[in-house]
Amino acid sequence: MSTFERYGINGPRPHLFYGNLPEIHKYGNVICVSKWMKKYGSIFGYYVGGKRVLIIAEPNILKQIQIKEFKQFTFRFSPVHDALFADKIFKFMIVSVGGFRWKMMRTILRQAFTTLRLKSAFNSFEEPIDVFLKKIYNHAKNDEEFDIYPLFQALTMEAIGRGAFGATSNPQTNPRDEFLNAAKAVFEASSKNFLHGLALMFPEFEFIIHPIRRLWNEILVAFDADPFTYLGKICSKIIEHRRNQYKPRNDLLQTMIETKVNLAGLKKMNEDSLDISSDTNASEQSVE
């Protein structure tokens, strides 16, 4: 009997070692979760290897979690230590950090999502969307079937590149675009990472597997074969170029470069006092 079964929580029956990973790898996480939600309801559990995942799609409970008890849920789920890649820089990403560093990064990023900044960011999306629609129109005009997934991939990367980094890459018209191919390589590597899968299936042996993952990552970096490091180098070039630019742009990267955080103000906030309202106030008081 699984942990979820002992607590009366429904869900797909897990394999002893793989959990529900085979089905997730075969059909994709989105399709699997949608199918399970229809079968088991708005609250159910499944297993990513040996890790338990509880899905909650009940509005009242989500309100309790995200607003009333927000201070209890300040960390993101990470299936293995240092997540997909064992590179030490990965643990400093906003999807991996928690506690004080998470509060600091969140405070900085909030400034990029004001109404004014979001409206100004929309202008950078018009051209990529026009290119995307033109490609769709050409396929429709020729009355032919086509795979829309790579088109959405290219559109997404171009929108992220322009909106977040102000980078004028053209992945929709250039299949060899450096930014697009680097991002693709990261996702492909994560799905084929044997050591990552091993850590998922046997979390109790992570203290042995993690050092091996770190060593393997160092080997990949040494031979310039690590896709995550390669993508990081591209982003570093963009950041360095932006720092040397005379005319600043109104995007997420510029916000992160220009924002100064009052660390003393953030340190006064402990985890017990952190909620939605205090987080908003901290952004107003801690950013200069």
Image (cartoon, rainbow, N blue to C red):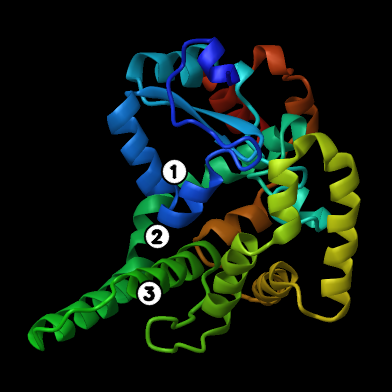
Comparing marks 3 and 1, which lies closer to the viewer?
Answer: 3
Q: Are marks 3 and 1 in contact (CB under 8 Å)?
A: no
Percent coordinates x, y for residue 227 in the rendering: 69, 72
Residue under the image location 11 percent in, 80 percent down: 140
Q: Nearer the viewer, residue 15 or 250?
A: 15
Distance from disc 2 to disc 3, alpha carbons, whole Å, reads 24 Å
Residue that carries the numbered disc 3 in the rendered image: 150
Residue under the image location 34 percent in, 25 percent down: 40
Q: Looking at the image, is mark 1 or mark 2 earlier in the sequence? A: 1
State whether residue 233 is above or below residue 28.
below
Task: Kindly identify the amino acid type of the residue bearing the numbered disc 1.
Answer: Thr
Residue that carries the numbered disc 1 in the rendered image: 114
Q: What secondary structure is found at the residue carrying circle 2? A: helix
Left/right of residue 69 with respect to residue 117 in the rendered view: right
Q: Nearer the viewer, residue 233 or 212?
A: 212
Task: Kindly identify the amino acid type of the residue bearing the numbered disc 3.
Answer: Pro
Distance from disc 3 to disc 1, alpha carbons, whole Å, reads 31 Å
State whether residue 45 is above or below residue 27.
above
Q: For label 2, count other residues whose C-alpha is less than 10 Å away and answer few (under 14), some (14-19) or many (20+).
A: many
Percent coordinates x, y for residue 130 in the rendering: 24, 76
Quarter-of-image position of residue 240: bottom right
Task: Kindly identify the amino acid type of the residue bearing the numbered disc 2.
Answer: Ala
Residue that carries the numbered disc 2 in the rendered image: 121
State whether residue 25 is above or below residue 225.
above
Percent coordinates x, y for residue 32 in the rendering: 39, 44
Residue 115 can be seen in this image: no
Percent coordinates x, y for residue 77 in the rendering: 62, 35
Q: Nearer the viewer, residue 185 or 19?
A: 19
Q: Are marks 1 and 2 in contact (CB under 8 Å)?
A: no
